[in-house]
Amino acid sequence: MARNCNENDDDSIDPTSVTSNVKNTIKQEVIKDLLNGSFQDNKTKLGNDALSLVVEVAKCLVTETCLRASNQALRESCDRVELEHVEKCLPQLMLDFP
């Protein structure tokens, strides 16, 4: 797998930028459709409060994953986050978000 690595030690990850991108990307309707599609019983309903909570947890999980993968890429002197960076973060992330 080809990686774009540089010799720059520029540790400039902007958490605010990552957070705002995630908040604008995750849509409540998509989460609702995913959850409704996984229910065993067709009579199961999802309340608005529960949906809002699940969306916020999903945003936190995605934001944290992006930040950890970005940090992993920086530690490896890469200027792009690749799937392998996310994969390296997953074990600890799964322990932190049970």
Image (tube, helix red, strand yellow):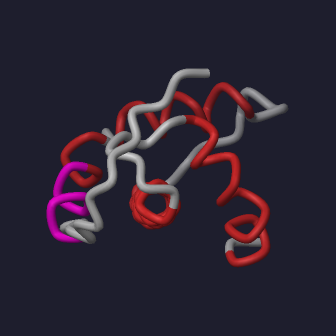
Query: In front: 54, or 4?
Result: 4
Residue at image x 58%, y 35%? Answer: 83
Q: Is residue 16 left or right of residue 48?
A: left
Residue at image x 84%, y 32%? Answer: 40
Query: In front: 49, or 67?
Result: 67
Q: Is residue 7 left or right of residue 32?
A: left
Q: In this view, does 37 lie to the left or right of 32?
A: right
Is 2 placed above or below 25 here?
A: above
Quadrant in the picture for residue 45:
top right
Indicate the position of residue 36 as horizontal and vertical percent values: 61, 32
Indicate the position of residue 79 as horizontal and vertical percent values: 32, 45
- Residue found farthest to the right: 40
Q: In which quarter of the image is the N terminus?
A: top right
Q: Is residue 58 left or right of residue 26?
A: right
Q: In which quarter of the image is the C terminus?
A: bottom right
Indicate the position of residue 49 as horizontal and vertical percent values: 42, 65
Query: In front: 49, or 98?
Result: 98
Residue 17 on the magenta segment = yes
Quadrant in the picture for residue 92:
bottom right
Is 95 placed above or below 3 here?
A: below
- In this rendering, the count of numbered labels is 0
Examine the residues drawn in magenta and state their main secondary structure. Answer: helix
Span colored in magenta: 15-21
- Residue found farthest to the top: 1
